[in-house]
Amino acid sequence: MDFKNFTNEDFDVFQIDGLEARMDALKERIRPKLESLGQYFAPALTTLTGDELFVHVAKHARRTINPPKDTWVAFANNPRGYKMLPHFQIGLWNTHVFIWFAVIYEAPQKQDFAKRFTKKINKIYKETPKDFVWSLDHTKAESVPHGNLSKEDLRGMFERLEQVKKAEILCGYEIKRDDVLKLSEEDFLQRIDYVFNKVAPLYKIALNIK
């Protein structure tokens, strides 16, 4: 695979002022790397989940004023879109890389997914690594380590996903910028692969895949 790891210059794209200038740099520097990651991991995720997964590189097409603070490649079982479905993401802010399983607010079947998560809460709580993190908003960089959550905290997050229209839930792993810069391409790809193996059960629970 012809993938070059993220660099300081890639992370610094998110410091560029102005929508057009930042988007130009993002398209030139980061998008080709996201496309490479997409082509590399789509077959692996298809094997992991039993679902054919398609690659979607974020276009940020709705933006007219504010430049994006992060960007990503997503994987979902629909070639036309991913936001309405449980999906996986690899992306970056200027501070870190994220690897997510995600259900965001645009998913119309959120309530069903949330009920399935709640039903399997013992398995999810036990099998999620303590250094993995949870987020309730994909537009913010903040997250909470799984090791800091009680089972009741997690239940509350699942209930919120079921009951609140704009609720979201993401689970995965973050690699700090400085740590990304130290990793070889091979180590970086192995780290992502490890995370996807750990969060793939969430995808299968959401979609009731045996």
Image (spheres, rainbow, N blue to C red):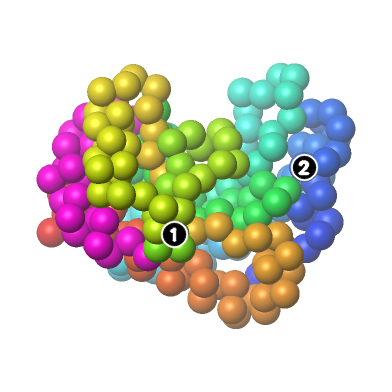
Instruction: Tell me the crowding category of disc 2: few under 14, some 14 to 19, or many 20 or more residues within 10 angstroms, Cα based.
Output: many
In the image: residue 135, left or right of residue 150: right
Residue 138 x/y as whole percent: 51, 37
Q: Residue at x 51, y 76 (%)?
A: 190
Residue that numbered label 2 is attached to? 14
The C terminus: image quadrant: bottom left
Rounded to the nearest whole Å, what is the CA distance between mark 1 and mark 2? 24 Å
In the image: residue 187, left or right of residue 10: left
In the image: residue 140, left or right of residue 48: right
Residue 44 falls within the magenta-colored stretch: no
Q: Amino acid at mark 2?
A: Phe
Nearest the viewer among 143 and 204 is 143
Nearest the viewer among 20 and 89 is 89
Residue 78 x/y as whole percent: 35, 43
Residue 131 x/y as whole percent: 46, 63
Q: How many numbered tags mark residues here?
A: 2
Q: Residue at x 17, y 37 (%)?
A: 115
Residue that numbered label 1 is attached to? 132
Of mark 1 and mark 2, the one earlier in the sequence is: 2
Q: Quadrant of residue 21?
A: top right
Q: Quadrant of residue 69?
A: top right
Instruction: Kindly check if marks 1 and 2 are in contact, taking CB atoms under 8 A apart as contact.
Output: no
Residue 117 falls within the magenta-colored stretch: yes
Residue 63 x/y as whole percent: 67, 24
The N terminus: image quadrant: bottom right
Nearest the viewer among 198 and 156 is 156
Q: Main secondary structure of the magenta part?
A: helix
Q: Residue at x 25, y 43 (%)?
A: 152
The magenta segment is 106-129
- Disc assigned to residue 87: none
Q: Is residue 31 above or below residue 58?
A: below
